[in-house]
Image (cartoon, rainbow, N blue to C red):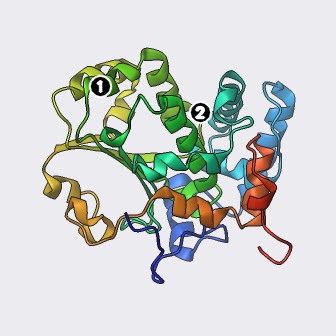
Amino acid sequence: MDTTMPEEYSAELDIGEPPPEVLKYAREHLGEDPDTRTKCLQELQDMIYEKGECTPHRMDDSFLLRFLRARFFNIERSHRLLVNYYLFKEDNPQYHLDVEPLKLRHIGDDDVLSVPPYREQTGRRLMIYRIGNWDPNAYSIDEIFKATLTVLELGILEPRCQILGGVAIFDLENLTLQHTWQVTPSIASRMVQVMVTSFPMKINGIHIINQPWLFETMYAVFKPLLSKRMSEKIYFHGTDMESLQKHIHPTCLPKKYGGVKPEFPYTIWLDSLKHNKIIVKELLSLGYKLDPKDMPNDDEK
């Protein structure tokens, strides 16, 4: 896979004010009213103090706003999501405390996970998994989990991503029994927690492609854990790329899936982000580790 970044693509996070059309979407679909946003933030902050169910590492507006957006500005549901977010971290410290994201390069090198430096047609981020490329003998599923959570923590820094959410593609070509054995009920439960109950990122669609018959065994572990609403966001396409393209336009897909875009490993994204002071500060505050030589110099962002 080519590891250079063509000039027309950028792996930089868009952490500035969302464009007018995205803010319009937030008003129409999330109930985000600029006139009452401050009031909602204050109510959420008051509830955090009053209930005392978690101690956030931050209480500023930009941090709390991502939870309100994820729960359509319902204060109680936003608070529950915040509590679940910290409970998940407390219960699973192995996924973020003392984890060095840049040492998870092998997952990108193996093309198990990628985050393209382009979006799908509605402006949502894409995450692409190719589980068949993963060698369970080389590293555990926990390594993939660590990489996923790092990508999500970085992605949710984008206000655009908080508002629009994201889309995932699971390419299950070359899936084997050895892969399916790794997806235990406890792993499945954690995945559902991240997708549904414990992370301020809205998953707008999960697209399963190239699934073999073995997939039924894996999906049987997940299915009882999924709500009706979440189940309705999962689409099964098999080898029918035209079916996938009804949801994600070919101009926003890699060539492998009938699109026009080149392939990119997620390491390009990480390598770009590590030079941004704001992003490095966020990672460090969450318990991640970065080698000093990988941190930005004073003349960088």
Seen in the image, is 296 located left or right of residue 209? right
Q: CA distance from mark 2 to mark 1?
A: 21 Å
| Image quadrant where one finds the C terminus | bottom right
Which of 131 and 206 lies nearest the eye of the viewer?
A: 131
- To which residue does mark 1 refer? 219
Q: Residue at x 74, y 37 (%)?
A: 98
Res. 233 image quadrant: top left
Residue 71 position, x and y percent, is: 58, 42
Residue 42 position, x and y percent, is: 81, 47
Which amino acid type is shown beneath numbered disc 2? Answer: Ser
Residue placed farthest to the bottom in the image?
A: 7
Whether 24 is drawn above or below 31: the answer is below
| Image quadrant where one finds the N terminus | bottom left
- Please tell me whether mark 2 or mark 1 is closer to you in this view: 1
Q: Within 10 angstroms of label 2, few (less than 14), some, or many (20 or more) residues?
A: many
Are circles 2 and 1 on residues that touch, CB within 8 Å? no
Which amino acid type is shown beneath numbered disc 1? Answer: Tyr
Q: Which mark is residue 72?
A: none
Q: Earlier in the sequence, mark 2 or mark 1?
A: 2
Count of numbered labels shown in the rendering = 2
Q: Residue at x 45, y 52 (%)?
A: 109
Q: Residue at x 84, y 26 (%)?
A: 52
- To which residue does mark 2 refer? 198
Residue 132 visible to an observer of this rendering: yes
Q: SS at mark 2?
A: loop
Res. 143 image quadrant: top right
Seen in the image, is 132 located left or right of residue 113? left
